[in-house]
Amino acid sequence: AVCIQQPFINELSRRLSELLQLPSRNFESNEFVRYEPGQHYVWHSDEYSWRASRPDPVDVLSGPRVLTFFMYLSDVEEGGQTAFAGSDPSGTSRVASASRRLAVTPSKGKAILWANMKDEWRRAEPAAAHTALPVRRGVKWAATLWVHAAGFRIPELYAGRACHPRMQ
């Protein structure tokens, strides 16, 4: 079974844990994405669990996605920026005020970290709404790692030998 114990993923989790001073059990598994010319991702917020009509028990135990750590794994010839809603998360003036927004240009090795929740972790941070703008030329590779308020990976403790090579 493929799991989070891969050396690259382990090292990435260790470094982020050290940087944030949080245990890696608070992290979701990495999500890797690839965008080719014309591809993009719509405006969204990374924190969703507290709005669900029937919250997932794991989300209730681990709390919301309080932080997002986003890594650019390639350079992009043109386009592919990550743009943030800033003070207008409603979307009514997203196009009109796009020039005043924070838009991060992809560059291999660059990483960005943002808060998805307000200080008390009970309300989503509207300014964290973001989009992946269309890639115009080249290919964009990136990885996302979401950080929860508490132990998101606790269920993996019961996954058996497949995710615990030392037990074999």
Image (cartoon, rainbow, N blue to C red):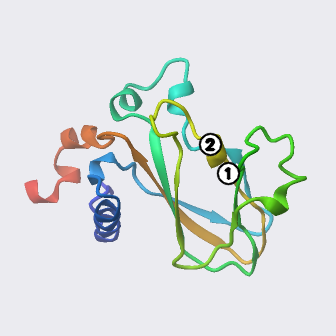
- In three-dimensional space, the C-alpha distance between marks 2 and 1, rounded to whole angstroms, equals 6 Å
Which residue sits at x=69%, y=78%? Answer: 76
Which of 135/49 is in front?
A: 49
* Amino acid identity at mark 2: Ser
Q: Which residue is mark 1?
A: 130
* Amino acid identity at mark 1: His
Q: Residues within 10 Å of mark 1 (few under 14, many from 20)?
A: many
Disc 2 to disc 1: CB gap under 8 Å: yes
Above or below for 58 versus 43: above
Q: Is residue 58 left or right of residue 23?
A: right
| Residue 153 x/y as whole percent | 30, 43
| Residue 105 x/y as whole percent | 68, 72
Above or below for 28 versus 118: below
Mark 2 falls on what kind of element? loop
| Residue 38 x/y as whole percent | 80, 64
Which of disc 1 and disc 2 is earlier in sequence?
Answer: 2
